[in-house]
């Protein structure tokens, strides 16, 4: 599925969230697919089950997954996912920070716009956004 980087500045909890989101967004895990149980995923990743549970709760809060009692945890359909303004604000802040860094290292405004458009186009090709 994915590997965790113990030297990363991100916590294990954040890495689990980011990796599952990436698998969902790129289409590696399709809508309504069942995710491994908390216990199974914690064994595979060699992390505390509470860490995986916390990650699942956050992914559910953000609308990426849903839980059916007694059946498991599943991936939401993209068109059913509610827009979470807090997540939009957080990601927008990260983009702004990175754009400022591009300017700082000498990338022109036109080049930054081309980079952002290229990223957006590639994301839509891989299922990373609503069309």
Image (cartoon, grey):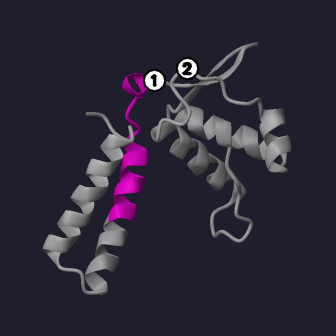
Cα gap from disc 1 to disc 2, whole angstroms: 7 Å
State the image quarter where residue 15 is shown: bottom right
Please check the rendered image and state whether residue 103 is part of the magenta-colored stretch, yes or no.
no
Magenta-colored span? 78-95
Q: Quadrant of the N terminus?
A: top right
Question: How far across and how far down the image is residue 60, in percent?
Answer: 58, 32
Q: Residue at x 46, y 40 (%)?
A: 25
Question: How far across and how far down the image is residue 82, in percent?
Answer: 40, 29
Q: Residue at x 76, y 13 (%)?
A: 70
Instruction: Name the main secondary structure of what is drawn in magenta.
Output: helix
Question: How far across and how far down the image is residue 31, in percent?
Answer: 51, 24
Q: Which residue is mark 1?
A: 77
Question: How far across and how far down the image is residue 90, in percent?
Answer: 42, 55
Element marked by disc 1 = loop
Please check the rendered image and state whether residue 94 is part of the magenta-colored stretch, yes or no.
yes
State the image quarter where residue 97 is shown: bottom left
Q: Nearer the viewer, residue 26 or 21?
A: 26
Looking at the rendered structure, which numbered label has been put on residue 32?
2
Q: Are marks 1 and 2 in contact (CB under 8 Å)?
A: yes
- Which residue is at the far left? 110
Q: Is residue 73 visible?
A: yes
Left or right: 4 with respect to 45?
left
The residue carrying pointer 1 sits among few (fewer than 14), some (14 to 19) or many (20 or more) residues within 10 Å by Cα, namely some
Above/below status of 6 relative to 122: below
Q: Quadrant of the C terminus?
A: top left
Left or right: 13 with respect to 65?
right
Q: Residue at x 59, y 42 (%)?
A: 20
């Amino acid at each position: 599925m994915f590997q965790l980087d113990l030297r990363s500045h991100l916590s294990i909890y954040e890495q689990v969230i980011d990796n599952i989101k990436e698998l969902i967004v790129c289409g590696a895990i399709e809508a309504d697919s069942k995710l491994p149980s908390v216990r199974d995923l914690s064994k595979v990743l060699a992390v505390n089950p509470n860490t995986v549970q916390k990650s699942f709760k956050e992914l559910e809060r953000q609308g990426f997954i849903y839980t059916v009692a007694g059946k498991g945890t599943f991936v939401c359909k993209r068109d059913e996912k509610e827009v979470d303004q807090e997540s939009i604000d957080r990601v927008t802040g990260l983009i702004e920070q990175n754009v400022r860094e591009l300017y700082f290292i000498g990338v022109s405004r036109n080049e930054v716009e081309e980079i952002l458009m290229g990223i957006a186009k590639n994301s839509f090709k891989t299922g990373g956004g609503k069309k």
